[in-house]
Amino acid sequence: MQRDELVTILLPTYNRPSYLKIALDSAICQSYKNIEIIIIDDSPNNDSESLCLQYGNKLRYFHREERGGIPSAYNFGLKKISGVWCKLMSDDNILAPNCIEKLVNHAFKTNLQILYSDYSLVDEKGIELGIHKKTNYSNYYKFVFSLWKSMPLNNETTLIHKTCFDTVGEFDSNFGSMSDFDWHLRACLVYKCNYIHVPEILFKFRLHKTRASNLELSDHESLRKWNQTEIKIREKNKKLLMKKNIQEWKYFELHQKKYKNILKPYGNPSISVWRKTIQLVPSRIRRFIRRSWNTSVKGFVEFTCPICQMKDIQRLLYVEPSAKSFTCINCNTTFEKKHIKINYK
């Protein structure tokens, strides 16, 4: 069924005109034509403004004198939108040509719904690094328990109905780049928004050194603060739900054990007896055995994940060389052989 509701693409930018142009072109060239594009520019110079003016009436441009961060820019833009649907993105990412069309056509004729898709990961030059396929949860509680643990979706792959923002409210700028985790936990746990998974690659997520989340996770101290922020977000939403409906919180707490299988510790799969035994062997001998096994017997191979840089072999999935893809257990990214160089250690 074809839909024709107005979709607003909300795109904050900060001093990255080269990336912004690619993002804008991907938004303007959508197969779905009933869209409006709103740019919120926090840049200290006029480079992004000059670029946006070249597009004329194809977008609406707003410049803010003081930089407030992405959550603040989203909140500013939400007051300007006219669309029934809102597509959030940032200036360094890319929409597939049919992204909006696919998402809208998967929507139901109800309010309070949020659609999200799979996506690919690209580097600074736009070269594909891997594919992120999200889980299609069978019911609400499986999804909300997964969300309680960590973000099971990428905020920028979402298409959000305007009634969700009217009900859930704005992003909490106090949580910085983790404000999306807070907002989606609030939307799902407290206000029961309906999440719909679209199992198609509709978005390109760019990885580069200047990305805020990369900078925040650059060392152990930053990672500790990140985990503390997650705890604060859970506590905040727990209080909100208890205030709104304490029986619902008790039900949620009671049934967490039922879905314990999806609440495994992050990046810490069980270690087999064989792995524990082989660790007792000197590393030099282990390398020789692995190389002989991989080349002669064609057994398992190992690789270092180029996305999360995980080098701990206990957190990587071993597969046969004949397999078409590899998966990192730590960040759940799938790689085809063309994406990575396999290291024999």
Image: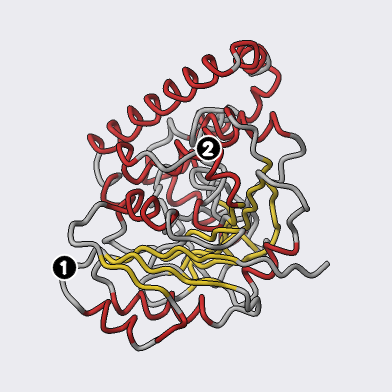
Q: State the quadrant of the C terminus.
A: bottom left
Which one is earlier in the sequence, the residue at label 1 or at label 2?
1
For residue 101, which quarter of the picture?
A: bottom right
Residue 146 appears left or right of 230: right
Q: Could you say whether the residue bearing mark 1 is in a helix, strand or loop?
A: loop
Distance (Cα) linking label 1 and label 2: 32 Å
* Residue, disc 2: 168
Residue 146: % across, % down: 60, 33
Residue 340: % across, % down: 48, 66
Residue 79 appears left or right of 142: left
Which one is in front, 33 or 130? 33
Please say if the residues under marks 1 and 2 sit with CB atoms less than 8 Å apart: no
Q: What residue appears at the point 43 percent right and 30 percent down from the top-left corner? A: 280
* Residue, disc 1: 44
Rendered position, 55 above or below 243: below
Within 10 Å of disc 2 (Cα), the crowding (few <14, some 14-19, many 20+) is some
* Label annotation for residue 70: none
Rendered position, 213 above or below 221: below
Rendered position, 235 above or below 52: above
Q: Could you say whether the residue bearing mark 2 is in a helix, strand or loop?
A: helix
Residue 37: % across, % down: 47, 71
Residue 225: % across, % down: 28, 32
In front: mark 1 or mark 2?
2
For residue 107, which quarter of the picture?
A: bottom right
Residue 24 appears left or right of 158: left
Kind of residue at disc 1:
Pro
Residue lying farthest right?
Answer: 1
Q: State the quadrant of the N terminus.
A: bottom right
Way the structure is coloured: secondary structure
Kind of residue at disc 2:
Val
Within 10 Å of disc 1 (Cα), the crowding (few <14, some 14-19, many 20+) is some
